[in-house]
Amino acid sequence: MPQDRPSTSGRVRPGDVTTVRAAMEVLAERGRKGWLARLLPFLGPAFVASVAYVDPGNFATNIQGGARFGYTLLWVVFASNLMAMLTQALSAKLGIATGRNLAELCREHFPAPVVWGMWALMEAVAMATDLAEFLGAAIGLNLLFHIPLLAAGFLTAIATFVILGLERYGFRPLEAIITSLVGVIAISYLVEVVLAGPDWGQIAFHSVVPQFAGPESVLLACGILGATVMPHVIFLHSSLTQGRIVTRDPRQLRRLFHFELVDVVMAMSLAGLVNAALLRYGGHHVGAGGHAGLSPPADPALAATAGHHAAIPGGHRRGPGAHADAGHQPGGAQLRASLRAHPTGDVYAPP
């Protein structure tokens, strides 16, 4: 196996010299360094791949799952994340062991018509995936800074090319900036979840006990799985590891893969926590039994239409799960009608 591995030595770029030298010293077991110093040169590829696990698809499915079913689908998030760890570890192993990425091996081993069909399919998948990321970034700039969508789209394109342009200096600068961006997302959501005061008992229960709450929950579970284990990132991970640290020694290859496993576990665990936080964020006031106590709109009629237990202007604000006595408050008739239509009060349709 190592004899068939193509050599990429001599192509180390300026930004990678220190990282590659430190990694080779660790693989050769030279010098005495702490565990963190030994690990750092190998961290990065899985964090780049983890971007696909915190994309708009994850935002949509997880927030909707939390808003509709509370903690019920939390086990799907963690099960999907474990599957992602397996597939990403296998993809990384492929790049390390063969020195080729998954696309190159498919080209070598499949008939030409199959290869062309796969290429066309992957181009369509890449465009569909990039469209969601591109629009998400443009809308984010519009919401944060009130930049018109067209101008925000151009800024997104410029930022994308600038980040990709870092590859000319090597893999390390690109890994560093993408890991930093993922870290900002992770810290933001995890802090918000802690501030929201989650029910840790319910989280522990629904993390390990598989449950569904009707056909719609099954559909959302499929969406969560599909937004987590994604084919394009499997191709990507093998490409990220194929020429990053090159060695022909079988013993060093095994050590390299062990370090990459640590990278995968760390990055995918972080992505899993972000996805769990998204689910928690979507249902941040959903109590046991799925009764939504999310803060209602200010308009009593809108509050009644949404099916909440509302806080009516001029009345007393009700806590999560409390039924509003709206008989003497504006909008009481609409609220009573809504509660008769949805007596459990668990219907929440985000705008």
Image: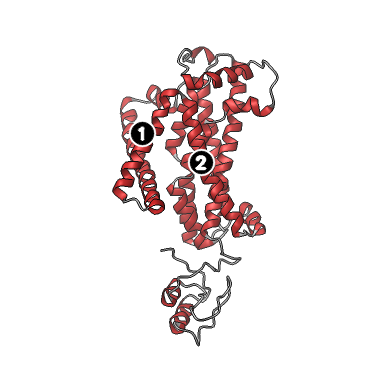
Q: Which residue is located at x 62 percent, y 22 percent?
A: 255
Label at residue 243? none
Residue type at the position of mark 1: Phe
Q: Quadrant of the C terminus?
A: bottom left
Residue at image mark 2? 182
Q: Can the viewer see residue 52?
A: yes
Q: Position of residue 347 (x, y in %)?
A: 48, 69
What colour scheme governs how the chains and residues are painted in the rendered image of this protein?
secondary structure
Q: Is residue 328 left or right of residue 137?
A: right
Residue at image mark 1? 161
Query: Dot 2 surroundings within 10 Å: few (below 14), some, or many (20 or more)?
Result: many
Q: Position of residue 228 (x, y in %)?
A: 49, 44
Q: Secondary structure at mark 2?
A: helix
| Residue 44 position (above or below residue 200) | above
- The earlier-in-sequence mark between 1 and 2 is 1
Instruction: Judge by depth and name the residue closer to the eye, 8 or 171.
Output: 171
Q: Position of residue 292 (x, y in %)?
A: 53, 68
